Image (cartoon, helix red, strand yellow):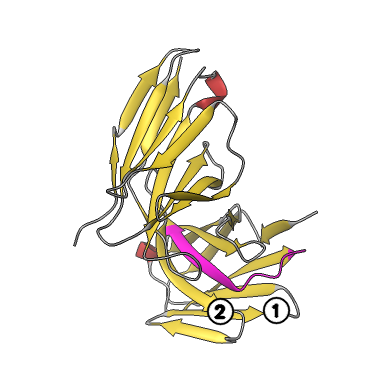
Amino acid sequence: SQKIEQNSEALNIQEGKTATLTCNYTNYSPAYLQWYRQDPGRGPVFLLLIRENEKEKRKERLKVTFDTTLKQSLFHITASQPADSATYLCALETNRDDKIIFGKGTRLHILP
Amino acid sequence: AAGVIQSPRHLIKEKRETATLKCYPIPRHDTVYWYQQGPGQDPQFLISFYEKMQSDKGSIPDRFSAQQFSDYHSELNMSSLELGDSALYFCASSLARGAYEQYFGPGTRLTVT
């Protein structure tokens, strides 16, 4: 069956280290993949979008990779800060239409 | 900068009642998406509209319907409400279909008692 998996429900990282979150998918061939941040009780906030023909995308301390062979995206936060603590969701479009599927998210805790 | 507006922010209804949620996208955004998010769950795609036409459908119950109006605002109508419909309902808008980021509204918290 088609699904998206994010590596873990929760991840604890020491402040200043790099946090790496994983998004794996099966049975999709998305043209692009997105990463969002969500704080409790709030709507997701867009962070980065990476297209199938792009291997890597960067924005400030954020980096996303997209490996269509492995069917995997990695999301990195370098020099992590306690303010980075949130749930991070990966999302991809299915079947090259407007239907967007979200992963269950990874709760990231940056420990001071 | 203008953001996505959703109203109401909170809504309490009884079982079998009807609810209408409204979404006002960012100006010049012609694509609207609706999501349902239960406690501790990921957002579940319900339905999307592009240029006032339904463009895709997800796990939206038959009891729900939605439309996008000429001014691009959208409404989600929910009838015969059930306890399980209690959730946060998010609307998102994007500049166009496809590979464009979605901007989410603050959500409407629906509680069915």
User: Distance of mark 2 from mark 1, alpha carbons?
Assistant: 10 Å
- Residue type pointed to by label 1: Thr
* Tag of residue A19: none
Is B58 situated above or below A47?
Answer: above
Q: Secondary structure at mark 1?
A: loop
Residue A112 as seen in the image, left or right of residue B36: left
Q: Is residue A74 magenta?
A: no
Q: Is residue B79 shown to the viewer in this render?
A: yes
Q: Residue at x 54, y 19 (%)?
A: B82
- For the C terminus of chain A, the image quarter is bottom left
In the image, the segment drawn in magenta is A26-37
Residue B104 as seen in the image, left or right of residue A65: left
Towards the viewer: B64 or A26: B64
Q: Residue at x 27, y 57 (%)?
A: B26
Q: Are marks 2 and 1 on the same chain?
A: yes
Q: Is residue A112 shown to the viewer in this render?
A: no
Q: Position of residue A53 (x, y in %)?
A: 60, 86
Give the residue pinned by disc 1. A68
- Residue type pointed to by label 2: Arg
Q: Position of residue B33 (x, y in %)?
A: 45, 50
Q: Residue at x 56, y 43 (%)?
A: B41
Judging from the image, mark 2 belongs to the subunit labelled: A
Give the residue pinned by disc 2. A51
Towards the viewer: A10 or B56: B56
Density class for disc 2 (Cα within 10 Å; few <14, some 14-19, many ≥20) is some
